[in-house]
Amino acid sequence: MKNFKFIIPVAFLALAACSPATHTADTAADGQDSLTSQNADTSVSTALFAKMQIKDTIKAGEPVELKFTVYNNADSVQHFCKWHTPFEPLMSKYLTVKDANGQEADYKGAMAKRIMPPPADSYLKVNAKDSLSANVDVLKGYNIQNAGKYVITYEGQNMSGLIVKDSVSFVYIK
């Protein structure tokens, strides 16, 4: 039992030394500018980015079709996880849909449990200077019934690794 008193703190210190925050501090201590390191990391991660498109006005009864396009600006093939994107069926809440009053539309779709890390077949490749697109009917996962203006924001970047800077909006009419 006495050994556990020493093993737990040592294990905690060893795991803490592996954290990304520790590595950032280490590179700054080595004489590199930490801002430069962050910019290098950002440029690598922004080689892939996504944009959303939707019709300006959608009538009740029509699908609320969201087009999601992933662009690769890099000179090499890039990969992203298709989980939490329209490149797979709606299996999680990766979009936020709000009306003009800021009221969030209820998510009514499936919530899949995932194994981590994602298996190799969960990744899609995007060739250099190319793009991939997928469509999703937002009504299949979100409860949109009232007429009005809605704003859609992408929230799945932590899983997919994709950055979507802009939201899209549409007017839903009866």
Image: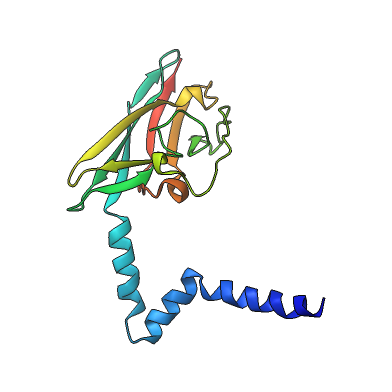
Q: Please tell me in which quadrant of the rendered image residue 39 appears.
A: bottom left
Residue sitting nearer the eye, 71 or 63:
71
Colour scheme in use: rainbow
| Residue 95 point in image, percent of width and height | 47, 38
Which residue, as the protein is rendered here, is positioned at the far right? 1
- Number of marks in picture: 0
| Residue 130 point in image, percent of width and height | 19, 41
**Residue under the image location 55 percent in, 25 percent down:** 143
| Residue 57 point in image, percent of width and height | 35, 23
Q: Check the picture and name the quadrant holding the N terminus.
A: bottom right
**Residue under the image location 40 percent in, 39 percent down:** 121
Q: Is residue 77 left or right of residue 92?
A: left
**Residue under the image location 43 percent in, 48 percent down:** 157
Residue sitting nearer the eye, 168 or 43:
43
Q: Is residue 145 left or right of residue 137?
A: right
Q: Please tell me in which quadrant of the rendered image residue 81 appears.
A: top left
| Above-or-below relation of 41 to 52 | below
**Residue under the image location 53 percent in, 48 percent down:** 116
| Above-or-below relation of 53 to 16 | above
Which residue, as the protein is rendered here, is positioned at the far top? 61
| Residue 111 point in image, percent of width and height | 58, 34
Q: Is residue 106 left or right of residue 172?
A: right
